[in-house]
Image (cartoon, helix red, strand yellow):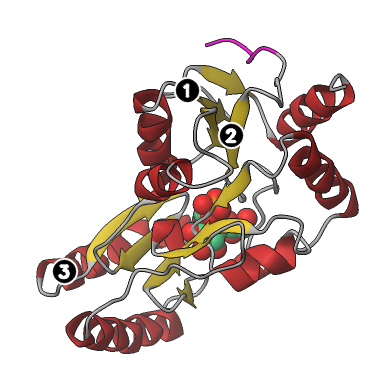
Amino acid sequence: MTHPHRLLPDRVSLFLDVDGTLAQIRPRPEDVGPDVRRNTLLRRVARAVDGRLAILSGRTIPEVDYILDNAVRAVAGVHGLERRDTEGERRDYLITDEVRQALDQAILVLNALAEQKRGVLIEAKGKSVGVHYRLNPEAEDMVLTITQNIAQNSPLSLQRGDRVAELRAPGPDKGDALRAFMNEVPFEGRMPVFVGDDLTDEHAFRAAVELGGFGVLVGPERETLARYNLPNVAAVLDWLEDGVAHHA
Ligand SMILES: O=P(O)(O)OC[C@H]1O[C@H](O[C@H]2O[C@H](CO)[C@@H](O)[C@H](O)[C@H]2O)[C@H](O)[C@@H](O)[C@@H]1O
């Protein structure tokens, strides 16, 4: 895979992931916070693409706003289950009472697991709950067994990410979120480009390709639907910087 060519702000609708793409991976989710260089750059990128910039994240929208210091208005959170358009209008996917109860029940079970197992962290995100094991990778098998069991016996879906197993409400993914933005002003009619690093980002790579654009995978090469590769977060920021610096 090769480095993407220079970003051409006039031609694209740009979609960016957060963790592992705009922010370095840290031991715990709460270790990630605002960064002046990144967030100033994102404001410049938003201006260069005339507002055709959206964030597609697994985090909740308020967390994205905190980390990015409100630099981007259009955000899909919790992998597409939450969405806010460029006007600031929330267009969240509504979950049923049955799914809500299943999530509440899962959180009880998973909190008990986290109390027993050192280094396992629970992240409740409203429409999903993540079980992080980065601080104790040996807990992976146990975390997967328990979350698979919950998924098999509830309406929740199991979604794996980077050292995290997540039980989420069924509903839109990042690909659906990208498609929804691409049907709206100001995104429609331009070429979608999505930059992401995680397994959950493959849905958005697929959507970008199907709509005539492409994906950029961040991090080590692997089997992916992305066409290009950037090695790390610093390279993503440099690529964005270069694109806006050469924009008239
Ligand atoms: O779609 P993203 O914006 O990339 O969000 C994916 C998940 O990111 C966070 O977890 C990951 O990053 C943490 C901080 O670097 C790290 O400690 C954890 O191991 C990673 O899985 C976030 O906490 C999740 O809610 C997001 O789904």
Between disc 2 and disc 3, whose residue precedes? 2
For numbered disc 1, what is the local secondary structure? loop
Which residue is tagged 1? 213
Q: What percent of the width, then of the height, locates residue 113?
A: 36, 80
User: Could you classify mark 3 by the number of other residues whose Cα lies within 10 Å: few (under 14), some (14-19), or many (20 or more)?
Assistant: few
Q: Residue at x 18, y 67 (%)?
A: 151
Within 8 Å of ligand 1, the CB of disc 1? no
Q: Number of numbered discs present?
A: 3
Can I make out residue 19 in this image? yes
Q: Answer yes or no: do the residues labelled 1 and 2 have beta carbons within 8 Å?
A: yes
Q: Residue at x 57, y 20 (%)?
A: 229
Can I make out residue 134 in this image? no
Out of 238 and 86, give the one closest to the viewer: 86
Between disc 1 and disc 3, whose residue precedes? 3
* Main secondary-structure element of the magenta-colored stretch: loop
Which residue is tagged 3? 149
Q: CA distance from mark 2 to mark 3?
A: 39 Å
Between disc 1 and disc 2, whose residue precedes? 2
Which residue is tagged 2? 13
With respect to residue 33, does 225 lie above or below? above
Q: Residue at x 26, y 60 (%)?
A: 158
Viewer-nearest of labels 1 and 3? 1
Judged left or right of residue 43, residue 57 is left
- Amino acid type indicated by mark 3: Asn
